[in-house]
Amino acid sequence: MTTARMQLGMSERTTLAIGDALAGRGMRSPIARVRSALLFAGPAVVASIAYVDPGNFATNLQAGAKYGYSLLWVVLAANVIAMLFQGLSAKLGIVTNRNLAEISREQFPMPVVYGMWGISEIAAMATDLAEFLGGALGLSLLLHVPLIVGMGLTGIVTYAILAAGGQGFRQLEIVIGALIGTVALAYVVELTLVDVNWSAAAYGTFVPQLRGPGALSVAVGILGATVMPHAIYLHSGLTQNRAPAKNAIARRKLLSFSNREVVVALSVAGLVNMAMVIMASGAFHAGHSDIAEIETAYRSLTPLLGAGAAAVFLVSLLASGISSSVVGTMAGQMVMQGFVGFHIPVGVRRLLTMAPAFVVAALGVNATDALVYSQVVLSFALPVPMIALVIVTSRREVMGAFVNSRRMTIAAIAATVVILALNAVLLLQTFGVIG
């Protein structure tokens, strides 16, 4: 590495190294190829934190405790849908050098754009409520302080990480990756501490079933907690200017690396989600199926599995809440700037998105209930970016030679229809139209 390159920041060196890899320079040895592949890792890792945020803790806890392993198939299905749409979002950014919000502003009538922006802002508030409240809850339980104090501390920590992210994308990718690794490792430990019926877990993973009308609400909550609106917007923004693709050949190489990263990163996130359900089922379903709150689960883990299991649970919740809150704020900034061209300082954005969580805490609303309800809100907002993404990536004037194939378009439409149908059934059930 030259002296001039060493004097550059980490993100600048990464960008230059990606350019070398795309040009085929320094790719002779297997070690060099592995290092080059790691250069492209980052966007899907950051986006994947949306799939293991505190909302997932709440819905997966309820799913496992009340319904055992029977809703694992929902987690699997949601994760496959997530891979499809995160891959499309990443492709949009790589091919067009613009994010989904920016493309939507160009492609759709302004009344539609403003409607999309409004729905996306509501989704951003619901997202941040889950993420910020989850991190605060983890700190509150870990430090034995009031929830309001935990919220203040979480706000300080997330702002510090966001400020560090202003120094370059690579630093933020590494921090978020380390926090995701902490969550994943925590659940590896949890699975060693709980008795698991692996044959029942396998059956629940691959055989669709809904045990009672309440299972539908939890299933839609899982879907809302797993496939996240802000992650679909964010991924296109993370890839739009990260790597210097100067021609179609370079873009195809980028897409190849991106697709692999999406599969790996979201597979890890999906396995963590499954581990959450399996842990809750193994620990609570037999004899403690009424446990539906994070605080109760934490306090119940000590007599059931030991203090170590409870501590690991809290550490994972804290890492999840802090990292996902950072990513949620980034996505909110991107959505606002993309749809309406309006930019506010990240500190102001952080304060605005924290406000609903403070209101919920001040009103005394149960934290876990608020988390679950926020995921249901997200599931209703989810079709907006999904439909927009399918439309724009299917337009040749936007994507050129990288336009979606017919098979890809059909798969994306089918996934969107499934989510719309589930949301419609849940709405009818909520208002008592169906039982």
Image (cartoon, rainbow, N blue to C red):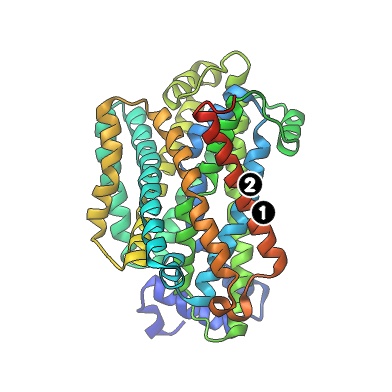
Task: Decide which of 200, 101 is in the foreground and name it.
Answer: 101
- Above or below, 254 relative to 302: below
Whether residue 64 is visible to the viewer of this picture, yes or no, is: no
Element marked by disc 2: helix
x, y (%) of residue 83? 61, 56
Residue under label 1:
414
User: Amino acid under label 1?
Assistant: Ala
108 shown above or below 416: below
Residue occupying the point 60% across, 31% down: 216
From the viewer's side, name the closer residue of 51 and 2. Answer: 51
Of the residues shown, which amino acid type is indicated by label 2?
Val
Q: Position of residue 214 (x, y in %)?
A: 58, 25
Who is closer to the viewer here, 185 or 352?
Answer: 352
Q: Classify 260 as above or below 276.
A: below
Q: Nearer the viewer, residue 174 or 28?
A: 174
Q: Relative to 178, is 136 on the left or the right?
A: left
Q: How many marks?
A: 2
Residue tagged 2 = 418
Q: Above or below — where is 129 with respect to 281?
A: below
Q: Residues within 10 Å of mark 2 (few under 14, many from 20)?
A: few
| Quarter holding residue 259 | bottom right
Looking at the rendering, in which quadrant would you find the C terminus? top right
Residue positioned 60% across, 84% down in the render = 248
User: Seen in the image, is 17 located left or right of residue 165?
Assistant: right
Task: Report, in whole angstroms, how far the alpha carbon at label 1 lies from the one at label 2.
Answer: 6 Å
Q: Secondary structure at mark 1?
A: helix
Going by the image, does 348 lie left or right of 365? Answer: left
Crowd tier of the residue under label 1, counting other residues whose Cα lies within 10 Å: few below 14, some 14–19, many 20 or above: few
What residue lies at 42% left-to-right and 61% top-to-bottom?
112
Query: Residue 14 in the image: x percent, y percent?
Result: 46, 74
Residue 90 visible in the current orientation = yes
* Circles 1, 2 touching at the beta carbon (< 8 Å): yes
